[in-house]
Image (cartoon, helix red, strand yellow):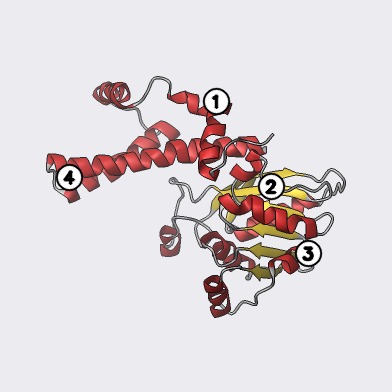
């Protein structure tokens, strides 16, 4: 796809994710417009040598409008900008919560997409210092992306999803593959699978390390070395099937599940529980259907 004739607007270009996606877009053939409302953020954009464009003007010109703003204001921002977008343009958000909750302003002639980075895999074969340093992705370490695409009802364009994938692959580069799912499936992945469960487990490991060091009294270097190495083995054995756990380890694992994990923990995958966590995240009373 020829990208040089396509215009992408980054709304919230001075934010954490706004800067990340902008840094890759400026290296591409896309014409990129940068919009930022906060005075401090505007100063940052100028310091980066990037020209500022008014949000409404940027949205009106762009083929793809990226809303790199906090989830809690996505509804308000989309209400302001979607009405001025070009017919056939794409509204792209970076998290599925607002789209799933029905907070985004819709137009029958505007496509809607959501794309969230997977971040570099724990099993990624890194070969350079830059790849090792890039734990988040979008700089040097390859990553995959999961995305959803909802075509406009009144502007069917088979090339629209192709354009969305080109922008997604550019802003999260280097990208190995973009996986396409529904908005609901993406919401199950983020937050349920990776935040409600995986990130919570990571925080639990940190708390366990603190208890081992500060309550039990194990030297911190020894405890950290043991935890980091065994975390790698645990993930390799469970997610890749690299090696079987010993019988004694399996008994200890069962004890841990009985002591720590609730029997009904899989309820977090039910629809009402997904609705509950997203309403908390977005600070809203209910999901709009």
Residue 3: x %, y % from top left = 75, 64
Q: Nearer the viewer, mark 2 or mark 1?
A: 2
Which of labels 3 and 4 is toward the front? 3
Q: CA distance from mark 1 to mark 3?
A: 39 Å
Q: Is residue 261 visible?
A: yes
Return the x and y of residue 234 as percentages of the image width and height. 34, 35
Which residue bears the numbered disc 4?
Answer: 213
In the displayed image of the protein, which residue is found farthest to the left? 217
Q: CA distance from mark 3 to mark 4?
A: 56 Å
Cα separation, mark 4 vs mark 2, equals 46 Å
The residue closer to the viewer here, 218 or 173, is 218
Q: Which is nearer the N-term, disc 1 or disc 4? A: 4
Q: Which residue is mark 3?
A: 60
Q: In the rendering, at what x and y percent does residue 20 appear?
A: 55, 63
Q: Which residue is under mark 1?
A: 270
> Earlier along the polypeptide chain: callout 3 or callout 4?
3
Marks 2/1: CA distance? 23 Å
In which quadrant of the rendered view does residue 61 lie?
bottom right
Note whether 52 is above or below 61 in the view shown: below
Q: Residue at x 49, y 28 (%)?
A: 268
- Separation (CA) of disc 2 from disc 3: 17 Å
Q: If the image is split into quadrants, where does the C terminus sit? A: top right
Of helix, strand and loop, which one carries label 2? loop
Relative placement, left or right, of 108 versus 104 is right
- Looking at the rendered structure, the secondary structure element under dot 3 is helix
Residue placed at 77% from the left, 61% from the top?
Answer: 63
Assign a secondary structure to mark 4: helix
Q: Are marks 2 and 3 in contact (CB under 8 Å)?
A: no
Spatial distance from mark 1 to mark 4, Cα to Cα?
37 Å
132 relative position to 93: left or right: left
Q: Earlier in the sequence, mark 4 or mark 2?
A: 2
């Amino acid at each position: 796809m020829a990208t040089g004739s396509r215009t992408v607007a980054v709304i919230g270009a001075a934010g954490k994710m706004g800067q990340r996606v902008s840094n890759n877009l400026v290296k591409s053939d896309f014409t990129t417009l940068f919009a930022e409302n906060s005075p401090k953020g505007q100063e940052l954009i100028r310091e980066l040598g990037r020209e500022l464009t008014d949000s409404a003007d940027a949205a009106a010109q762009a083929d793809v409008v990226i809303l790199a703003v906090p989830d809690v204001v996505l509804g308000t921002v989309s209400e302001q900008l979607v009405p001025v977008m070009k017919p056939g343009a794409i509204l792209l958000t970076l998290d599925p919560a607002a789209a799933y909750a029905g907070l985004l302003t819709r137009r029958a002639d505007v496509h809607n997409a959501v794309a969230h980075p997977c971040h570099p895999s724990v099993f990624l074969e890194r070969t350079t210092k830059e790849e090792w340093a890039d734990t988040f992705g979008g700089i040097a370490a390859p990553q995959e992306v999961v995305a959803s695409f909802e075509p406009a009802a009144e502007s069917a364009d088979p090339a629209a999803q192709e354009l969305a994938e080109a922008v997604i692959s550019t802003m999260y580069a280097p990208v190995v593959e973009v996986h396409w799912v529904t908005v609901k499936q993406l919401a199950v992945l983020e937050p349920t699978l990776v935040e409600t469960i995986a990130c919570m487990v990571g925080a639990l490991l940190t708390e366990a390390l603190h208890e081992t060091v500060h309550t039990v009294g194990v030297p911190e270097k020894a405890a950290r070395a043991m935890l980091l190495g065994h975390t790698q083995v645990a993930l390799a054995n469970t997610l890749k099937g690299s090696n079987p756990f010993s019988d004694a380890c399996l008994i200890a694992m069962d004890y841990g599940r009985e002591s720590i994990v609730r029997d009904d923990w899989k309820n977090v995958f039910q629809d009402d529980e997904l609705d509950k966590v997203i309403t908390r995240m977005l600070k809203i009373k209910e999901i709009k259907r």
